[in-house]
Amino acid sequence: MNPASVFSTDIAIDLGTANTCVFAHGRGIVLNEPSIVAFNTQRGTVEAVGQEAHEMLGRTPGHIKAVRPLRDGVIADFDAAEKMLVHFVRKAMGRSAWRRPRLVIGVPSEITAVERRAVRDSGFRVKASEVHLVDEPMAAAIGAGLPISEAAGNMIIDIGGGTTDIAVISLAGSVYGRSLRVAGDAMDAAIMMYMRKTFNLYIGERTAQQIKFDIGSATRLDESLEMDVKGRHVMEGVPKTVRVTDEDIRVALNEPLRQIIQAVREALERIPPELCADIYDRGIVLTGGGALLRNLDHRLRDDIGLPVLVAENPLTSVVLGAGAMLGDIGLLRKVAAN
């Protein structure tokens, strides 16, 4: 290990609705855990954070409450978000926890000034010396290796847990940006609703997420997939198991996917023709956890008629891009959204 990296306190954070990733300068990604905090309401203390808290979802006794501090890509529970941020930053810094870190935090491109201030304040409460906010699609584009500084259009779609960020970038600036509050969580909710209406089965968020990962797809698959899903019967109130196919889940996911595709079409309609031509040549790049949905790139390509590529590391593109800015102050000053 580089001796200097032991003392580096520069940290980049992708504060996601579903997962929080932390990048330490000189060490790379040091943490990637669910954005969840479990509180003990009787004692008023934090019981668990991250992966340990995720395991408690839907399984906690009355006095243990597992919460997601972020909803739709922004802080919904300030107290829980601050405690989660403190925990993750200290865990990432390890022996250097006594030092004051410089933070670069990725945020959705369309959050309000109040929401930006809340994120900045949370960063300073963890004793940060500096807090820089960068738009997630810009960070994702850098993390995906796009040539953002060139005088040419680069289109990126970052599908996270709470938001889908669509951006067209040229000369290290955002020509077009939109944050659509339809993403991974909306897909999970659509699966939960479909299971309730079609199979009379109540399922939780974790089960819906597992179904999406295991058999979810955006277009027909070469080989059909199916799985047994356990839940509670709506009418009888007892546990029940039903068999679900990939076709069922495609039907469930159709509406959130339609909204994302419509937002991409609107983006292409609103940018200058020259940039459209660049995007036609270069293609659209997909990042975020939603990019891992089977055949999503094929669905976008077929519906929009442009080449679509999935980034090499879609889950970590934002934090890798934010981390790259830690070592390039000029780039950070150019793209920071403070």
Image (spheres, grey):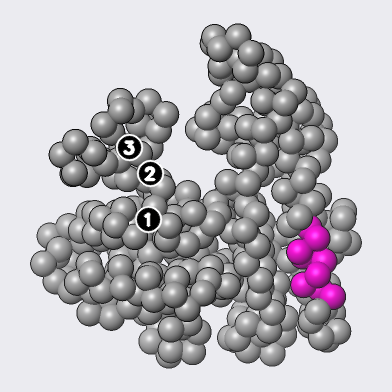
Provide the secondary structure element on which disc 2 rests: strand
Q: Compute the Cα span from label 3 to label 2.
A: 6 Å
User: Magenta includes 244?
Assistant: no
User: What residue is rendered at 78% in x and 58% in y?
Assistant: 261
Query: Mark 3 — residue?
Result: 65
Q: Compute the Cα span from label 1 to label 2.
A: 9 Å
Q: Nearer the viewer, residue 124 or 304?
A: 124
The residues colored magenta run 261-269
User: What residue is rendered at 67% in x and 39% in y?
Assistant: 190
Rendered location of residue 317, percent (x, y): 52, 62
In the rendered structure, which disc, 1 or 2, sits on the residue that comes first in sequence? 2
Rendered location of residue 6, percent (x, y): 18, 66
Rendered location of residue 311, percent (x, y): 62, 59
Q: Determine whether, in the image, residue 305 is placed left or right of residue 45.
A: right
Query: Of the residues shown, which amino acid type is indicated by label 2?
Result: Val
Provide the secondary structure element on which disc 1 rests: loop
Rendered location of residue 178, percent (x, y): 66, 71
Q: Determine whether, in the image, residue 232 is placed left or right of residue 14.
A: right
State whether residue 246 appears in this view. no
Query: Residue 77 bears which disc, if any?
Result: 1
Dots 3, 2 in contact, CB < 8 A:
yes
